[in-house]
Image (cartoon, coloured by chain):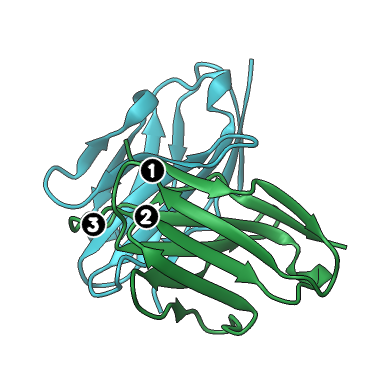
Amino acid sequence: AQSVSQHNHHVILSEAASLELGCNYSYGGTVNLFWYVQYPGQHLQLLLKYFSGDPLVKGIKGFEAEFIKSKFSFNLRKPSVQWSDTAEYFCAVTVSGGYNKLIFGAGTRLAVHP
Amino acid sequence: GAVVSQHPSRVICKSGTSVKIECRSLDFQATTMFWYRQFPKQSLMLMATSNEGSKATYEQGVEKDKFLINHASLTLSTLTVTSAHPEDSSFYICSASPRLGDVTQYFGAGTRLSVL
């Protein structure tokens, strides 16, 4: 069965530090990849997505992610985090023929300290 | 664009009663809507996929008689938790995909259900 693995469950950073959150998926076919963010008390918001083309995807709020097909990975990065980036981050995948079904990773809780 | 509204945001009910949660796509038509359940400090678990005008597809382990899903129009899907029990207390979230082939899902704000 398809699955999504997020390696870091909790990450604590200081402001201005660089961020990289890992995401790996298990599926050998065509995938669509997403990163969603859930700020405290708010709904899930789309950060960025990859369908095809340039494997380096830029999203909102300075986030980017790189799709590395050979590694089945879609890691999220940000060069310099801010306190307002404190949130939970979810990686998700849809697979071809999966009727848009999103498979979520367990999430990574990011805390940014001033 | 791509706003999904979910109502109510919070509901408290007595055990044995039924609760209906609405999910609306406000500025787009959604052929497909999804219902998720999120347990505290855990990820979202897909409960069912709802297609307009047809029966919902439930994930393994989800009781279709307990969680009734209706997708009567391209902008509205409802989830009814029937004969709710305390173990049904959870955070329920809907999402919708735009009609024109975009697989991106846009999420509602969720409904926190507390069954006493």
For label 3, the residue is B99
For label 1, the residue is B26
Tell which chain the image draws in cyan. A
Chain letter belonging to callout 1: B
The answer to whether residue A102 is seen in the rendering is no
Tell which chain the image draws in green. B
Q: Are marks 1 and 2 in contact (CB under 8 Å)?
A: yes
Circle 1 residues within 10 Å: few <14, some 14–19, many ≥20: some
Query: Label 2 to label 3, Cα distance in Å?
Result: 10 Å
As drawn, A17 above or below B104: above
Circle 2 residues within 10 Å: few <14, some 14–19, many ≥20: many
In the image, A36 versus B85, the foreground residue is B85
Q: Residue furthest left?
A: A53
For label 2, the residue is B75
Mark 3 vs mark 1: which is more N-terminal? 1
In the image, B23 versus A41, the foreground residue is B23
